[in-house]
Image: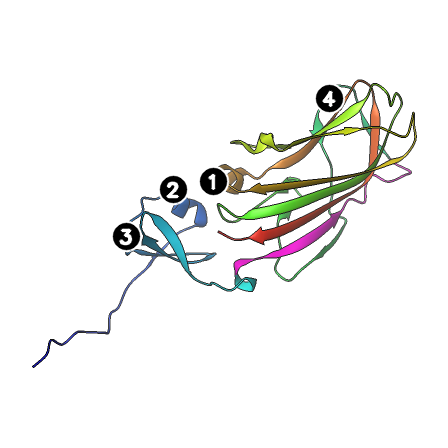
Amino acid sequence: MGQVFNTSYKVKTDNMTDSQLSNSNIENGSLVRTDSGLYMGHSGENVRVYPQSAGSLGLGWMRIDDTEYDSDNKLNLVDQVQVVLPNNAGNTVNSAGANYYDANTQKLISANENDVFITTVVFKSSAANANQTHLDIVLVGSGEIGRIHMVQQFYKGNDVEQGVHQVMQYYTDSDFVSNGVQIKIQSHGGTAKVWDIIYFIQKTQSA
């Protein structure tokens, strides 16, 4: 008589948050359930085994419009003073289930480590002294996110409206998941103004 195998097993999984999972020891073969899915320890990492479809992984996009600063109420930037590039999310459009921004804290957010995003920032701007002034746009948070840093110059002359379109691509680490990240702006060389601010956030890959 051949060997008989028991093919029916009952396995009780642990429940925890995604943040707790990212900071836990990895045990091969163990199952853990979080809000984002079911994970199994395998070859030194926690592998998501369910869900696996793109729609279930939270891929999508958001357009977030600020309604406070417009052509009648421009945000004044003081030379050498860094501030959050504001967005009160007065108008939003998004794909089903997409939620990558917290309007209360004005932070970009993510539920998981190693998610990948492309965020586009669009606004109008002007500078009183265009030849000597530029804008620094940077992601501010913990870890190495500050490497995402862009410079915007003024080409059209003093006090002339100019459109700005900046694209940022990044992945999320544990600090990003725990604390979020803000987009900040600073004028260098003189004062400047910005208005009609839009964030477009696209999640392109899920961990």
Q: CA distance from mark 2 to mark 3?
A: 15 Å
Residue 76 position, x and y percent, is 83, 28
Residue annotated with mark 3: 28
Disc with the residue nearer the chain's start (1 vs 2): 2
Q: Is residue 120 above or below residue 62?
A: above
Residue annotated with mark 1: 174
Residue 185 position, x and y percent, is 72, 30
Mark 4 closeness class: few <14, some 14–19, many ≥20 residues within 10 Å: few
**Amino acid of disc 1:** Ser
| SS under mark 2 | loop
Residue lying furthest bottom: 1
| SS under mark 3 | loop
Disc with the residue nearer the chain's start (2 vs 3): 2
Disc with the residue nearer the chain's start (3 vs 4): 3
Q: CA distance from mark 3 to mark 1?
A: 21 Å
**Amino acid of disc 4:** Val
